[in-house]
Image (tube, grey):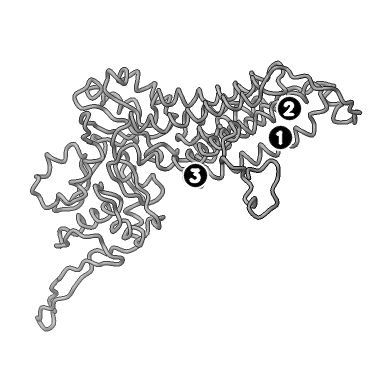
């Protein structure tokens, strides 16, 4: 039963009821970049059919425009055959939406496809590998999965746990295997999560491994480890709670991100609970034994040396996980959240329209302006973001039958009120840019940025963990000020161990 519960907890982050997944770039979507002129570009229609509905691409996204009788909808790829470039219906949203699907870098020109994150990046990578061929030869890459980066990130906690277990002071048979199993529970979260999950795994594993060693002593009937096990459990829960809270606070809270972090923590406890207790260990909980002082004989292991090697491996892995995306990644459209913009209300969209960054792409506020422009173009309305409760009037003439006098009056033909705004942002066309923007959960700006922009969300937490591990390493090496760190040495009596 515990094993079944363990598997269910590991599956929890990939459950469909959590909604859009938190990916590296766009929430709920994985980004595919295909080199123009490569073999992968020729096989791109097969990818669109293989990944199913909901894919946002140049072939699937649609554009609404005024056709002098109402609203017409056509795909972006067919828009050039319907509208001339000098046509006034080519508003800024229609002209700029192509930037989501075509990017030019120093390396080459790229076409971009946004795929719904229905499964993990490994499964998507395998599917793309089958259709498009190898990434290097085929000229494509998946922004959510760099094989070299993920391989280093997955191997780091395994090596970290193996070194600490091998040099443990209370090492027993099975300690290294138990530590490797505990580290392996973090591999799914590291593969499917942002780079900061690696830093979180190192912090939690550093507190879990001593607890696992004490629990293994307890399982084997050594009653001396009961009290230490309780203390280790408290330390582990405190480190896990603090690490998960800091990670979500710095990278952004969402239910999929919470499940991604909590799943390996709970799985680590279930792994320990799944170990069978012997009869001697059960008796140790009931009977209070008399302790006899026995001289300690060193076993040859050096915990300080193991901690030094493990922390060195952790620092090296954290540095590589942060530098590799900068060296191997490229520029592509990314969302840019703005402070104070939280919902799709008139005030939030007005702030988004006014505070969008430079080199920007059309965002959801431009889409609202596009809808208002196309719906009011037949009545002479110019391009502008609509004001709340703005009205479009039409002058009509009525003949009074009794007097024969013609009277003119203004008739309201369109009102841009709250209900109109809710309808504009609540029913996006499948596979459109509006669906991509609305899936972010809040209005975001969009701009073409390098890999440093997406990494900035998980970089602060990684830097904090890096500094903590480096401080522990410096303490073990005895690094510190040349003079003893006694701040009051000038105001106290001299001691023999103090530099005069």
Q: Residue at x 75, y 36 (%)?
A: 230
Q: Which of marks 1 and 2 is in front?
A: 1
- SS for tag 3? loop
Tag 1 and tag 2, C-beta contact below 8 Å: yes
Q: Residue furthest bottom?
A: 403
Q: Where is residue 283 in the image (x, y as percent from the top left)?
A: 87, 26
x and y percentages locating residue 342 in the rendered image: 41, 55
Asked if labels 3 and 1 touch by Cβ distance under 8 angstroms, the answer is: no
Query: Residue 176 location in percent, x, y?
Result: 64, 19
Q: Residues under labels 2 and 3: Cα distance?
A: 33 Å
User: Quick one: quadrant of the N terminus?
Assistant: top right
* Mark earlier in primary sequence (1, 3): 1
Front residue of this view, candidates 489 and 226: 489
Q: Do the residues labelled 2 and 3 touch (CB within 8 Å)?
A: no
Report the residue at 63% width, 53% height from top: 490
Q: In which quarter of the image is the C terminus?
A: top right
Read off the residue under disc 2.
215
Which residue is disc 3 drawn over?
A: 254
Q: Nearer the viewer, mark 1 or mark 3?
A: 1
- Image point (62%, 50%), residue name: 487
Residue beneath the point at 45% across and 35% down: 194
User: In this picture, is 125 found above or below 265?
Assistant: above
- Secondary structure at badge 1 equals helix
């Amino acid at each position: 039963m515990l094993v079944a519960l363990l598997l269910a907890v590991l599956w929890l982050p990939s459950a469909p009821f959590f909604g859009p997944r938190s990916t590296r770039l766009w929430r709920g979507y994985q980004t595919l970049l295909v080199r123009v002129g490569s073999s992968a570009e020729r096989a791109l229609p097969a990818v669109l059919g293989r990944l199913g509905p909901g894919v946002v691409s140049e072939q699937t996204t649609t554009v609404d425009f005024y056709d002098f009788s109402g609203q017409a909808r056509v795909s972006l790829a067919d828009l050039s055959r319907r509208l001339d470039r000098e046509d006034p219906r080519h508003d800024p949203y229609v002209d700029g939406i192509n930037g989501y699907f075509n990017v030019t870098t120093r390396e080459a020109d790229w076409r971009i496809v946004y795929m719904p994150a229905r499964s993990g990046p490994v499964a998507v990578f395998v599917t793309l590998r089958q259709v498009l061929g190898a990434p290097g030869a085929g000229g494509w890459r998946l922004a959510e999965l760099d094989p070299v980066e993920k391989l280093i990130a997955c191997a780091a906690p395994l090596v970290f746990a193996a070194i600490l277990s091998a040099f443990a002071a209370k090492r027993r048979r099975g300690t290294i295997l138990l530590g490797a199993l505990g580290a392996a529970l973090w591999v799914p979260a590291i593969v499917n999560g942002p780079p900061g999950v690696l830093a979180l795994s190192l912090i939690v594993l550093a507190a879990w491994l001593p607890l696992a060693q004490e629990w293994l002593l307890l399982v084997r009937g050594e009653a001396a480890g009961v009290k230490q096990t309780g203390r280790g459990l408290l330390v582990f829960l405190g480190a896990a709670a603090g690490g998960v809270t800091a990670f979500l606070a710095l990278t952004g809270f969402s239910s999929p991100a919470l499940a991604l972090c909590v799943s390996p923590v709970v799985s680590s406890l279930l792994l320990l609970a799944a170990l069978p207790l012997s009869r001697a260990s059960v008796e140790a909980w009931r009977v209070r034994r008399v302790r006899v002082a026995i001289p300690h004989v060193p076993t040859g292991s050096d915990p300080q040396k193991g901690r030094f090697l493990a922390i060195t491996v952790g620092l090296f892995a954290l540095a590589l996980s942060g530098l590799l995306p900068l060296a191997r990644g490229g520029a592509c459209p990314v969302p840019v959240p703005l402070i104070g913009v939280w919902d799709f209300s008139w005030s939030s969209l007005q702030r988004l329209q006014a505070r969008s960054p430079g080199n920007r792409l059309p965002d959801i506020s431009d889409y609202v302006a596009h809808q208002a422009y196309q719906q009011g173009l037949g009545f002479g309305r110019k391009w502008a973001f609509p004001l709340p409760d703005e009205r479009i009037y039409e002058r009509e003439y009525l003949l009074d039958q009794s007097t024969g006098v013609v009277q003119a009056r203004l008739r309201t033909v369109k009102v841009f009120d709250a209900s109109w705004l809710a309808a504009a942002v609540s029913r996006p066309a499948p596979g459109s840019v509006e669906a991509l923007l609305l899936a972010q959960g809040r209005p975001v700006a969009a701009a073409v940025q390098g890999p440093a922009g997406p990494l900035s969300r998980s970089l602060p937490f990684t830097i904090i963990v890096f500094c903590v591990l480096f401080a522990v390493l410096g303490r073990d090496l005895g690094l510190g000020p040349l003079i003893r760190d006694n701040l009051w040495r000038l105001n106290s009596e001299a001691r023999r161990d103090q530099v005069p």
